[in-house]
């Protein structure tokens, strides 16, 4: 009996090592990315996203070359008569440049984009505030902006980048079509349309201010049904249809769909650290 106990004490650690080695090898082959969660709230946010599933066509995205490409959404009252707004999107930039993610006419209404490194957001003509953190090219990054007429908040991958009451005031309505990846007023690196260069995925517009926890909980989900305050969602999984309403878009210029989407590219796995 004592001999068996000694053998068990020797074998169990070896088995644990073997299983751990196999597990890590499988993750490596699957191409999983690792994220270290330093706070319990970050880990809970990850857990809440585990039931997310890619969209049925495999997680594609919108590809734009920054030279006259866009998605155009017809004018709609509910996208313009806003007292509060949240805009979310996954982006993969190709260069530091001045470019649009969502544009409703930056000289008169709301606009989300970059100029040149951080987030820039207008709620009405010429009234802008820039974020603090550069949004680098070459990697998928989730950006979100909330604004209630007084306070704007910018989030990068679910973390607060900026909170400001500068240049506040009501959200002005636009007078024309809404654009994704461009703006009808132009004036950026692409002078004609302020075009985006890279990939855009899972764009959402809400008529409420979403909390940080809500943004984190839904970052990795493909939302396919109605939610309170949700006006439109564009998955870009082979088309520019609104997944929750009737704000369907039309591709312009050389806009295309890429087989690379944010779901397909990265699956975050928690790695616990001891402090």
Image (tube, rainbow, N blue to C red):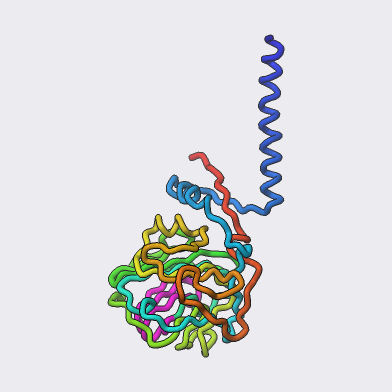
Magenta-colored stretch includes residue 117:
yes
Q: Compare residues 148 and 121 and report the one nearer the observer.
A: 148
Q: Compare residues 24 and 244 and report the one nearer the observer.
A: 244
Q: Where is residue 83 in the image (x, y as percent from the top left)?
A: 30, 73
Q: In this view, does 192 lie above or below 269?
A: below
For this orientation, the residue located farthest to the top is: 1
Magenta-colored stretch includes residue 112:
yes
Q: What residue do we see at 48% from left, 87% from top?
A: 186
Image quarter for residue 86? Answer: bottom left
Q: Position of residue 234 (x, y in %)?
A: 51, 71
Q: In this view, does 205 lie above or below 8?
A: below
Q: In which quarter of the image is the N terminus?
A: top right
Q: In this view, does 15 lie to the left or right of 238?
A: right
Magenta segment range? 104-130
Q: Position of residue 145 (x, y in %)?
A: 41, 68
Residue 221 visible in the snapshot? yes
Image quarter for residue 127? Answer: bottom left
Counting the numbered discs, the total is: 0
For this orientation, the residue located farthest to the bottom is: 192
Q: What residue do we see at 70% from left, 39% from top?
A: 21
Q: Is residue 78 left or right of residue 8?
A: left
Residue 137 visible in the snapshot? no
Image quarter for residue 77? Answer: bottom left
Q: What residue do we see at 57% from left, 85% from top?
A: 252
Q: Where is residue 148 in the image (x, y as percent from the top left)?
A: 31, 69
């Amino acid at each position: 009996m004592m001999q068996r106990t000694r053998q068990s004490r020797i074998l169990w650690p070896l088995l644990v090592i073997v299983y751990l080695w196999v597990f890590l090898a499988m993750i490596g082959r699957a191409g999983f990315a690792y994220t270290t969660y330093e706070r319990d709230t970050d880990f809970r946010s990850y857990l809440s996203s585990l039931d997310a599933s890619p969209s049925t066509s495999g997680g594609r995205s919108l590809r734009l070359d920054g030279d006259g490409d866009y998605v155009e959404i017809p004018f709609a009252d509910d996208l313009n008569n806003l007292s509060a707004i949240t805009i979310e999107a996954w982006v993969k930039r190709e260069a530091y440049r001045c470019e649009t993610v969502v544009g409703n006419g930056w000289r008169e209404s709301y606009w989300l984009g970059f100029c040149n490194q951080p987030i820039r957001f207008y709620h009405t003509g010429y009234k802008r505030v820039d974020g603090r953190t550069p949004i680098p090219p070459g990697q998928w990054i989730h950006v979100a902006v909330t604004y209630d007429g007084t306070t704007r908040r910018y989030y990068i991958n679910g973390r607060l980048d900026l909170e400001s009451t500068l240049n506040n005031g009501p959200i002005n309505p636009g007078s024309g079509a809404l654009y994704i990846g461009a703006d009808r007023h132009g004036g950026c690196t692409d002078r004609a349309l302020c075009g985006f260069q890279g990939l855009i995925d899972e764009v959402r517009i809400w008529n409420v201010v979403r909390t940080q926890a809500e943004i984190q909980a839904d970052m990795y989900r493909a939302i396919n049904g109605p939610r309170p305050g949700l006006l439109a969602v564009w998955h870009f999984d082979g088309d520019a249809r609104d997944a929750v309403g009737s704000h369907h878009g039309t591709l312009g210029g050389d806009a295309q769909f890429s087989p690379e989407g944010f779901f397909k590219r990265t699956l975050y796995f928690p790695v616990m650290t001891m402090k």
